[in-house]
Image (spheres, rainbow, N blue to C red):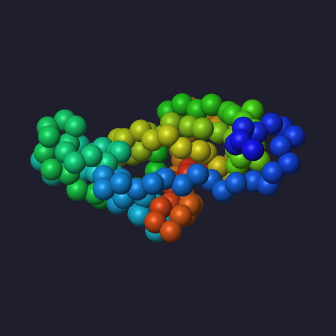
Amino acid sequence: MTDAATPSDPRPPKPRPAPVPDPDSAPYWAAAHDGRLVVQRCENCGTYQLYGRDRCLVCRGPVVWVEASGKGTVYSFTVIRQNYARPFRDWIPYVVALVDLVEGPRVMTNLVDCAPEEVAIGLAVRARFEPVSEEAGIALFELDR
Ligand SMILES: [Zn+2]
């Protein structure tokens, strides 16, 4: 049986897909597993960046992982109303959003624990975390009411 799903697919839900950490991303996934949001900060020019890279995108300086505030604002979003692939079919409708972190990086995420009608560009949001494997968690965001 393929993984292609239909509205009448009788198979049980699947867990949320888990990332496979690599040397550049492992600190991010491990921090999220432990309930912390981290970003990279350039030791030379102070620029924050995410996803993880070996050097600063601006000046090629060395970078370190630092804890982020977990706060941001909705830059843009869409509401997914049709996705029959497991596990997503049990979430519809759900919100996929681009969130601008206070520190600067923009991340793609899900907004959770809110009705899609409540979401608007510019709303304040804050991170929460969901472990998805022994070594990784993901950052989801909720409205910062
Ligand atoms: Zn730099």
Q: Position of residue 32 (x, y in %)?
A: 46, 61
Picture residue at 75% right of the left edge, 53% below the top: 13
Q: Is residue 26 above or below residue 48?
A: below
Residue 22 vs residue 139, the one in the foreground? 22
Q: Quadrant of the N terminus?
A: top right
What residue is shown at x 41% (from left), y 64% (from top)? 30
**Along the viewing direction, whichever of 71 and 11 lies nearer the viewer:** 11
Residue drawn 14% across and 38% down?
59
- Of residue 117 and residue 64, the one placed in the foreground of this image is 64
Q: Position of residue 4 (x, y in %)?
A: 72, 38
Residue 37 in view: no
- Find residue 48 and report its horizontal and vertical position in percent: 28, 45
Q: Is residue 18 above or below residue 105?
A: below
Q: In this image, 1 relative to 95: left or right?
A: right
Give the residue at x 69% y 34%.
80
Q: Residue furthest front?
A: 1
Is 19 on the left or on the right of 53, as rendered? right
